[in-house]
Amino acid sequence: MRPADIIAAGAVALWALLYAGPVEAWDRQVQQGATLARTNCARCHAVERVGTSPLREAPPFRDLHKRYPVEDLGEALAEGIRTGHPSMPEFRFDPDQAEALIAYLKSLER
């Protein structure tokens, strides 16, 4: 094996360690958040990149980042999210679920 081949193989391995792992973890987290959104929120909200919300006053998830930083929802999701309208049930997620749901919301910003 030529030295250039060894360097190239090392660069690929380093890239895989630095980038592929976090990307795969991010993708897994986004998928978990999407599942949570579909299971708990899709009855009222549009939770995908397209479509209208079944409940007219429920904002589409893809627009939430326009209203406020979705990162700020972590505490509310873990403590029990409440809103000013009576038709929304209270949701309480464990910290990993809250993080996954936020990751999914962030993925919709693109």
Image (cartoon, rainbow, N blue to C red):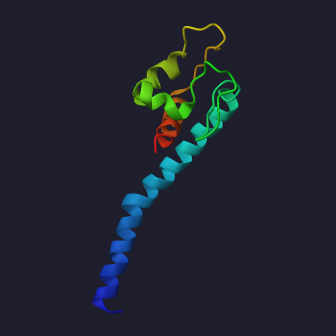
**From the viewer's perspective, is residue 8 above or below residue 47?**
below
Left or right, residue 92 beside residue 1: right
* Picture residue at 51% right of the left edge, 40% below the top: 108
* Picture residue at 65% right of the left edge, 21% below the top: 56
Left or right, residue 43 beside residue 16: right
Please identify the quadrant where the N terminus is shown. bottom left
* Picture residue at 30% right of the left edge, 80% below the top: 7
**From the viewer's perspective, is residue 34 above or below residue 40?**
below
> Seen from this angle, which residue lies furthest bottom?
1
**Residue 86 position by quadrant:** top right
**From the viewer's perspective, is residue 83 above or below residue 78?**
above
Percent coordinates x, y for residue 44 in the rendering: 67, 24
Percent coordinates x, y for residue 37 in the rendering: 62, 32
**Residue 5 position by quadrant:** bottom left
**Residue 53 position by quadrant:** top right
Residue 96 showing in the rendered view: no
Residue 2 showing in the rendered view: yes
Percent coordinates x, y for residue 11 in the rendering: 33, 73
Give the tally of numbered discs.
Answer: 0
Q: Nearer the viewer, residue 6 or 24?
A: 24
Q: Nearer the viewer, residue 60 or 78?
A: 60
Percent coordinates x, y for residue 6 in the rendering: 33, 84
Left or right, residue 92 beside residue 66: right
